[in-house]
Image (tube, rainbow, N blue to C red):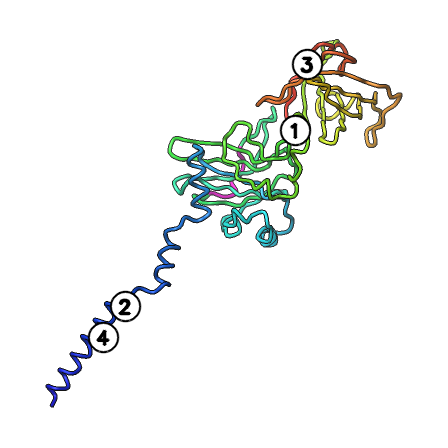
Amino acid sequence: MKKYIILLLAVVLVLGLASCKDKPAGNNEKDKAQVQTEPSLLDELQGKIKADGKLLGVAYLGWIEGDAETAKAELAKQDYIEDISFVKDIEKYAENEGYRMYAIVPADDSVTISVCKCEFDDEYMPYDGEELIEANGPILVRGNMSDTIPNLYVITKKGSEKVEYTPVQSGMDGRLENSENLVYDFTPYDKMAEFSGSDEIPDAEFCGNWIAFANDGNGEERSLILELNTDGTVSYAYGIGNSEVLERFEGTWKLDGDVLKLNLNGGVVEGVDEPIVISPYPLNASFEWEVNPGGLELTHIDGDAILYGTKGNTFEFYVNEY
């Protein structure tokens, strides 16, 4: 009797195994395999960074206030991160003073990223200060009270390669400053409200906050600060260094063919706490202009001199980071 029972159980077991062997794999297993093989948004981005020949990618993610946890929660709510949604899951985080948020992504995990505080030497050249964080993966950083003066300094290394970069906004259009093409910029400009309409005036690529240094007709060095706005307004001042303003002007700009015309009104400034212009007078000047990787070049061709004794001179303006 026991032999028959054992034989019966063996037959049932064999039939059960055959049934399992013939059963097709479920859709869940197929879907799981598919998910594991599809590249993530982060993988796709790192592929683009490599293809562009860069060690790192950087995105400006907006002005976001609050403490660290509040800021990251607020970032996760933003519609403009839809195509880079992995940024809301980045765990590595560091900050200095300021509320401008940036995502920094290495080309791969062999790249080391160090984020430091940005310091300036006596000649206003930036250098790396205290290290805030180091990682071989994506980092969220926040800082930069000013849009054009950095307080974050990023050092990226891979073997003998090294890239040093200060994430900051361009004085020309507010976009990520990358005039030296050091990083892959993956900022979602087309989805961010602050950049909508930023190209409404195609001929205004010279707009921005600029600074130049030049000698007047007496050989005295003066600093010239020129702000050209996309709405057609302009402000101009010159003085001694970055603190003492001698004359200040306000007005409008317009293009006449390839000539930039400034129509200003102002004059000598008096007062420290609340400086005012006394005895204002008109200042109208025309320039040939050129925007190049180094900045804005203006050559005076007609009208009043914007600085005593400089009619016909060429001025080299740079993005004003002071």
Q: Which of 256 and 66 is in front in this view?
A: 256
Q: Position of residue 273 (x, y in %)?
A: 82, 32
First reached walking from the N terminus: tag 4 or tag 2: 4
Q: Name the residue under label 4.
A: 16
From the image, which quarter does the C terminus lie in?
Answer: top right
Label 4 – label 1 distance at C-alpha: 74 Å
Q: What secondary structure prevails in the magenta region?
A: strand
* Res 299 label: 3
Distance (Cα) linking label 3 and label 1: 21 Å
Q: What residue type is labelled 1?
A: Pro
Q: Which one is closest to the eye, mark 4 or mark 3?
A: 4
Tell me the amino acid under the disc marked 3.
Answer: Thr
Marks 3 & 1, CB-CB < 8 Å contact:
no
Q: How crowded is mark 4: few (under 14 residues within 10 Å), some or many (20 or more)?
A: few
Earlier residue among tags 4 and 1: 4
Q: Do the residues labelled 4 and 2 touch (CB within 8 Å)?
A: no
Specify few, some or many for label 1: CA neighbours under 10 Å numbering under 14, 14-19, or 20 or more: few
* The magenta segment: 128-134
Marks 4 and 1 in Cβ contact (< 8 Å):
no
Q: Is residue 246 left or right of residue 69?
A: right
Instruction: Give the mark nearer the N terminus: 4 vs 3.
Output: 4
Q: Residue 202 carries which label?
A: 1
Tell whether position 199 is magenta: no
The CA distance from mark 1 to mark 2 is: 64 Å
Name the secondary structure under disc 3: strand
Q: Residue at x 67, y 20 (%)?
A: 212
In x, y percent, where is residue 161? Answer: 41, 31
